[in-house]
Image: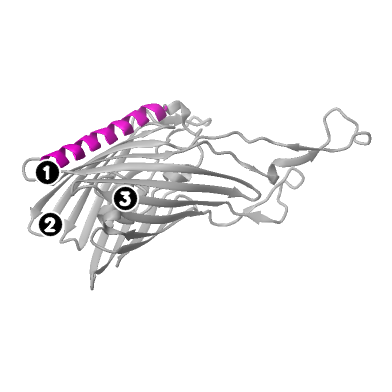
C-alpha cells in the first residue's frame, strides 16, 4: 500500500509538472514584446528573504514570504504554527514604495490559507496638467495601485507541496482605472531521504496568468468641436477614447536548491532558478543562504539576463535595460515561547540606475 501511495504521488507530480511545461509553451513570448505588458507591478519583489536571494530560492522560501515567489511554499512555513502574520516595506526605485501585508491560517489536514495585500506608494503627488493649463491646474494626484491575493497551499506528503493564488489587480489614475484577475500556481518537491540527493529541492511556478486588462473612465471623455468646422455654426460634440487592451506579464520559473549541513549548527543552501518572461529576455538567478542554528541567516544573490540587453539611446549612449545585479540580506529568528516566534529579514538589491539600490525589510510573526 505504501509503495502504491508513493507511486501515485510521483505520478501526480509528473502530471502537474508537465501541465506547467505545456502552459509555458502556450504563453511564452519573445524579447521583441518587451514593454508591451501592463500591470507590471505584479513583478515587483517583496519580502526580505526571497529578495536577498535574488528570487532564486523559489523551492526553499516558506510562509507568507513565499507567496510572491511560489505559493507552494506557504504550507511549509506555517506547518509548525497555527497562524502567521507578515509585514514588509520596500523602498523601490525613485520615490516608489511597496507595502505588503498578509495573514495565513493553518487548518491542519484541510491545508493552509493566506490573504495578502500589496500596494504601491508613488511618493509626492503629481501636478495635473491639461492642454489649456500645460503648467498645471493647481491640483495634483497620486496613482492608486494595489493587488489583493488569496492563496491555498497544502503539503500532499513530506516531500510534495502545492499552492495556488488568485489575485485581484486594481490600477487607478484620477478617474481612469483598470482591473483584472490573475492566477499563480506552483509545486515544490523536496528529496527527503538519505544518499546523494539528500537536501535537494525543486520548484516550478507559473505566475500572472489571466485575461487582458483595459483602462476606462470619465477622463477618457472629452467635448470637442469637429475639425474643419466653424465654431459659431457647430455645436461641440462629446467623444470617448477607447483604450487599448494589454496583457499581463506572465512568467514561468524553475528553481533548484541544495541544502547541506557543514557544521553541527550551520547549514548552507545553494539556490538557482530560471525565469522565462512572456515580455522580455529570460533571467537566470543564483543565491546562497548561510543558516546558523536557525537564529542568524546571511544571504547573497545575483541575477542576470539572457542575451544582449544593451540598448542605445538617441544620444548614442549605451545602457543596460536589465537593472538588477547583486543582492544581500540578513535574517534573525527569535523564539518567544509558547509556540510563538518572530523573524526579521532585511535585503539590499544593487541597481544600475537611480543609485542607492532597493532596500526591503519584513517581519514574520508566528502564533
Please give left or right for residue 136 compared with residue 96 in the image: right
- SS category of the residue bearing label 2: strand
Please give left or right for residue 276 compared with residue 155 in the image: right
**Mark 2 Cα-neighbour bin, 10 Å: few <14, some 14–19, many ≥20:** some
Residue 355 seen from this side: yes
Asked whether residue 365 is drawn in magenta, I would say no
Give the residue drawn at x 33%, y 31%. 306
Q: What is the span of residues highlighted in magenta in the rendered image?
A: 1-29
- SS category of the residue bearing label 3: strand
Q: CA distance from mark 2 to mark 1?
A: 34 Å
Q: Nearer the viewer, residue 170 or 282?
A: 170
Q: Main secondary structure of the magenta part?
A: helix
Q: Nearer the viewer, mark 1 or mark 3?
A: 1
Give the mark nearer the N terminus: 3 vs 2.
Answer: 3
Instruction: Give the labeled residue for mark 1.
Output: 2
Q: Say if 277 sits above or below 353 in the image.
A: above
Amino acid at each position: 500500500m505504501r509503495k502504491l501511495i508513493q507511486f501515485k504521488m510521483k505520478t501526480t507530480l509528473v502530471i502537474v509538472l508537465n501541465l506547467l511545461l505545456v502552459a509555458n509553451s502556450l504563453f511564452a513570448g519573445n524579447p521583441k514584446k518587451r514593454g508591451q505588458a501592463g500591470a507590471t507591478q505584479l513583478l515587483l519583489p517583496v519580502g526580505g528573504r526571497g529578495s536577498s536571494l535574488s528570487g532564486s530560492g523559489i523551492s526553499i522560501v516558506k510562509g507568507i514570504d513565499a507567496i510572491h515567489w511560489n505559493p507552494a511554499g506557504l504550507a511549509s512555513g506555517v506547518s509548525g504554527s497555527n497562524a502567521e502574520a507578515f509585514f514588509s516595506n520596500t523602498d523601490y526605485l525613485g520615490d516608489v514604495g511597496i507595502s505588503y501585508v498578509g495573514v495565513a491560517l493553518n487548518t491542519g489536514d484541510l491545508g493552509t490559507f493566506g490573504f495578502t495585500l500589496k500596494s504601491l506608494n508613488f511618493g509626492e503627488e503629481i501636478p495635473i496638467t491639461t492642454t489649456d493649463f500645460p503648467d498645471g491646474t493647481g491640483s495634483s494626484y497620486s496613482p492608486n495601485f494595489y493587488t489583493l491575493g488569496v492563496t491555498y497551499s497544502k503539503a500532499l506528503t513530506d516531500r510534495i507541496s502545492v499552492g495556488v493564488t488568485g489575485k485581484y489587480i486594481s490600477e487607478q489614475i484620477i478617474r481612469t482605472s483598470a482591473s483584472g484577475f490573475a492566477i499563480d500556481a506552483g509545486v515544490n518537491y523536496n528529496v527527503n531521504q538519505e544518499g546523494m540527493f539528500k537536501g535537494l529541492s525543486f520548484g516550478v511556478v507559473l505566475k500572472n496568468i489571466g485575461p487582458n486588462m483595459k483602462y476606462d473612465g470619465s477622463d477618457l471623455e472629452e467635448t470637442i468641436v469637429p475639425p474643419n468646422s466653424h465654431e459659431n455654426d457647430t455645436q461641440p460634440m462629446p467623444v470617448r477614447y477607447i483604450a487599448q487592451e494589454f496583457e499581463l506579464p506572465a512568467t514561468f520559473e524553475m528553481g533548484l536548491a541544495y541544502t547541506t549541513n557543514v557544521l553541527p549548527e550551520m547549514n548552507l543552501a545553494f539556490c538557482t532558478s530560471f525565469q522565462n518572461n512572456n515580455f522580455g529576455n529570460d533571467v537566470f538567478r543564483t543565491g546562497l543562504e548561510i543558516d546558523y542554528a536557525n537564529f542568524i541567516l546571511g544571504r547573497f544573490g545575483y541575477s542576470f539576463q539572457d542575451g544582449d540587453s544593451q540598448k542605445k539611446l538617441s544620444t548614442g549612449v549605451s545602457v543596460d535595460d536589465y537593472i538588477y545585479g547583486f543582492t544581500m540580506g540578513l535574517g534573525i529568528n527569535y523564539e518567544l515561547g509558547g509556540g510563538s516566534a518572530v523573524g526579521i529579514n532585511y535585503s539590499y538589491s544593487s541597481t544600475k540606475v537611480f543609485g542607492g539600490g532597493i532596500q526591503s525589510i519584513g517581519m514574520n510573526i508566528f502564533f
